[in-house]
Image (cartoon, rainbow, N blue to C red):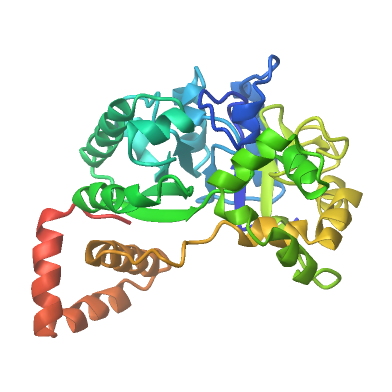
Amino acid sequence: MRSPYQALYFEISGHCNARCAYCHSGVQRRANAKFIDVRTFRDVLQRLLDNKVIQRGSVISLYDWGEPFLHPHFREIVGIVNALGLRYAVSTNSSRPPVFDRMLVKNLDHIIFSMPGFSQESYNRIHGFRFEDIKANIDGVVNGIRKHGFRGRFMISYHVYRFNVGEMKACERFADERGIRFNPYYAILNHWWEMKAYLNNTLPEARRAAAERDLFTLEGIHQVLAEAPKSDYRCPQNNYLNIDENGEVVTCCQIPREHPEYSCGDALSGDLPAMLEKKVSQPVCKDCIGSGMAYFLNTALRRPYFYLPSFMQRVIHFQHALRRIERLGFRGLSVKIIKKVRRRPNAANKMKTVCACAPSGK
């Protein structure tokens, strides 16, 4: 079976300890939430390898809705990734990071730090954590991982709300000083049922007013839906494979667990080709595309037009691009690019000044 997927998102934790006001996992805490069983995790990955859905060296993102570092056997999970010759990535709210040693760093590809602002006020409104602890935890993770020779990517995914626009540059400076990629993008109403209710004008008025007050992405949404491509639109979510903490193949990362078309079957024991075909042909997909919702969800998470990256962020982006070239086997080309840049006096001076004080990124 040839894999059509650009990425695999494997939810190892059905739990999230953040209280995000506009996220499904923050608004509705599930009493029956669980963690992936370590043996199930290993057997599912082995089956995907055997069927060539993934291959040696593939990057497995150990998250979807949950907080991966909450898994009580996170080390064993990573040990399985290492043993199978895979790589892994995590997206974290930075509230409960582990102590990274050489084993955890060995096949780490990148880490994303999810941030809802850069002040205690913003954290009170969204994640609910102590802001100073989060900054200290990020420093601990970055320094601890780089101590073991890690040259991969660190990224801050900054969720842009109307109330935290003024904090963006402070967060960017925090990232600049640590050689972390800063990636601001508009927050969305990341809750399937509430989004449907909003569009159907059945969302309670107080909730509707709060969402419109805080979120840029609800402004003009009806026009976006009306003008969205529909009959000929191929949803980008078809390019991603999602497996939940029960080992089930999930139709889409947006569809909640209680939706009747949430699951396509058991990744461990089901008919894998049939499940992957079902994933792209569910009735809910046709409805989502036909309403324009699919187009909206896949284009709303964009960088704000008013954000201009710092010089340091441009350098970090350049470094990441060069290392991507190297990973593709074109090391000689990346060396030539660096030499060409250094021949330019102004660029060379700036690069020397910045790179001398900044830890390398991927």
Residue 21 in the image, given as x and y percentages of width and height = 57, 33
Residue shown at 27%/39% (left/top)? 142
Residue 14 in the image, given as x and y percentages of width and height = 62, 26
In the figure, is residue 302 to the left or right of 147?
A: right
Between 200 and 258, the one nearer to me in the picture = 200
In the figure, is residue 241 to the left or right of 232?
A: left
Residue shown at 56%/56% (left/top)? 301
The part of the image, by quadrant, that contains residue 251 is top right
User: Is there any visible trace of residue 199 in the rendered image?
Assistant: yes
| Quarter of the picture holding the N terminus | bottom right
Task: Relative to 161, say whether 69 is above or below.
Answer: above
Residue 237 in the image, given as x and y percentages of width and height = 70, 55
The part of the image, by quadrant, that contains residue 190 is top right
User: Is there any visible trace of residue 250 in the rendered image?
Assistant: no
| Quarter of the picture holding the C terminus | bottom left
Residue shown at 87%/49% (left/top)? 284
Q: Residue furthest right?
A: 283
Task: Relative to 87, say whether 350 is above or below.
Answer: below
Task: Relative to 295, say whether 124 is above or below.
Answer: above
Question: How many labels were placed on the picture?
Answer: 0
Residue 235 in the image, given as x and y percentages of width and height = 74, 61
In the figure, is residue 353 to the left or right of 66?
A: left
In the figure, is residue 202 to the left or right of 139?
A: right
